[in-house]
Image (cartoon, helix red, strand yellow):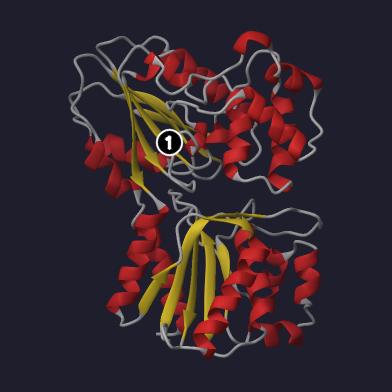
Amino acid sequence: MSPRDYLLNSFTAAIKAADPLNLVPQHLPNPPKGKTFVVGAGKAAAAMALATENAWPQDKPLEGIVVARYGHALPTQRIKVMEAGHPIPDSNGEYAAKQILSAVKTLTNDDLLICLLSGGGSSLLSLPIQGITLKNLQDITRQLLNCGANIQEINMIRKHLSMIQGGRLASICKAPILALIISDVTGDAATHVASGPCAPDPTTCAEALAIIHHYELEVSSNIIAALSAPNGMNETPKPNSSVFDHVENRIIATARHSLDAAAQYFREIGIDSLILGDTVTGEAREIAKCYAALVREIKFHPQRLKAPITLLSGGETSVTVKGNGRGGRNTEFLLSLLIALDGMANVHALACDTDGIDGSENNAGAIIAPDSLTRAMNNGLNPASSLFNNDAHSFFAKLGDLVVTGPTYTNVNDYRVILLF
C-alpha cells in the first residue's frame, strides 16, 4: 500500500471508533413504566436515532424527534428525523426545536427522555429566547465563526440566547433523562456538546457579553439587552441546581477513542505512533508551524523518536477569516504545514474532520505528500497567496488532493496524522 492508503485507512479506523450504530446500543437503558421519547441534534443525530430504534424492544413504546444537518438524515420508523441549517441556524431548526420543547413538556415521571447529542447540535436547535430573533442568531453566529473564537466561547453565547440549550431542556422535563453524547469538543464536557441542553451551565450572561466585547462583534441592541437583563432573568441553570437531579449526561465517544483506534491501526502495520493530544486548539496555520518544527526535530535529530512514525492529534483548531477564499480549518492547517515543510522528503500528512465536512465545504479535509509543493508550482498555484486568502480548499481541489467522504454520521472533531518514513 502507498502512504496515501495508510493515511486514509487510519482515518477510516478513527471514524469507525465513533460509529453510533455500534456505540449507542451499549448504553441504552431498560424501557420505563411509561413511554420513551427520544430527542436529539447534531451531525450524528440520525445515526444515533437509527441505532436506538434497532436496539429498542419492538413491543415497547418509542417515539421522538431528532434534528440533523441537511444531507445527514437516515431512514427511521419510530423517531422522526428533521433536517436544518448548519453552521448557520435556520427556520427549520427553529421549528424543530419548538416541536421538541412542546413534546418534552408533556412527559411525566413514569416516562423516559433519551437525548442524543453530537457536534453541530448548537446551530440545529435554534430557538431564541424572548426578545431575540432568528436573524439575530444568524448574524452573531456568522461573526463568531469568522473572528477566531473557540467553540467554548461560541457556545457560551449560544447557551444564553437559547430556549433549549444551556440546561434549559432539562429544566422543563419531569421525566428522567439520559443524554448520550458523542463529543466533538476539547475536554469532552457535556455542557459544550450541542451547547448542553441537559447539562448545567457554569458560565454567565456577563461572560457571554465579555466575549462579544473582546472580539468587537457588531451585534443588535436586543442581544446586549438580553445579556444585560437584571436579576438573572436570562441566566441558565447552574451546577448543583435541583433541575439536574434526574439527569445523566453520558459521553459515549471522544476524539481520544478515535486517536487510539488510529494508533492501533498503525501498530498493526508496524508503525509506531505518538499521540500529541486530543485537545489541540489555536489558529490552524500556527499549529501547523509547530508541527513542522517537531517533524524537523525527528528527521534531523532522531535520538529519541525515529521514523517510521506517525504523529496523531485531535481537537479543534480555528481560523480567523480575513480573505475571501474557500477553506476549512483542516485544509488551512495542511496548507500552512506544506509551506513550513518546504518539500521535505518522506513526510506525508492528512487532516480531516471526522464528520466528513471541513468547515462548510463538501470535503472532509485533504492530504499532502513530499511532491505536493512541486506539483502546486507546476500547476501555477501560489501556496502563500492561497493561505493569505484563506483559500486552502481551492488549492487542494486543483491538486486533486481533497478527501471527500460524504456524511460519516458521527463527529469527534478533527483528525490529523503526519506520517514520517
Looking at the rendering, which quadrant does residue 296 occupy? Answer: bottom right
Question: Residue 126: x percent and y percent?
Answer: 59, 27
Tell whether 275 sits left or right of 329: left
Q: Quadrant of the N terminus?
A: bottom left
Q: Does 139 sit left or right of 318 as displayed?
A: right
* Residue designated by label 1: 190
Instruction: Please provide percent x and percent y for residue 67.
Output: 49, 33
Point out residue 294 in the picture as x, y percentages from the top left corner. 54, 77
The picture places residue 21, in percent across and down from the top left corner, at: 31, 47
Q: Nearer the viewer, residue 352 or 218?
A: 218
Residue at the image point whose x is 46% and y is 82% from the top = 3
Q: Is residue 121 above or below residue 177?
A: below
Residue 262 left/right relative to 186 = left
Q: Is residue 421 visible?
A: yes
Quadrant of the image occupied by residue 136: top right
- Residue nearer the viewer, 212 or 402: 212
Q: Residues within 10 Å of mark 1 (few under 14, many from 20)?
A: many
Residue most toward the front?
A: 303
Identify which residue is drawn at 53% across, 20% down.
236
Residue under the point 35% across and 51% down: 19
Kindly identify the residue that appears in the image at 77 percent across and 69 percent down.
386
Q: Amino acid at mark 1?
A: Ala
38 or 233: nearer the eye?
Answer: 233
Q: Is residue 157 above or below residue 381?
A: above
Q: Is residue 232 left or right of residue 304?
A: right
Rendered position, 19 above or below 394: above
Residue 273 lies in what quarter of the image?
A: bottom left
Quick one: SS at disc 1?
loop
Of residues 5 and 289, the one drawn nearer to the viewer in this rendering = 289
| Residue 123 visible in the snapshot | no
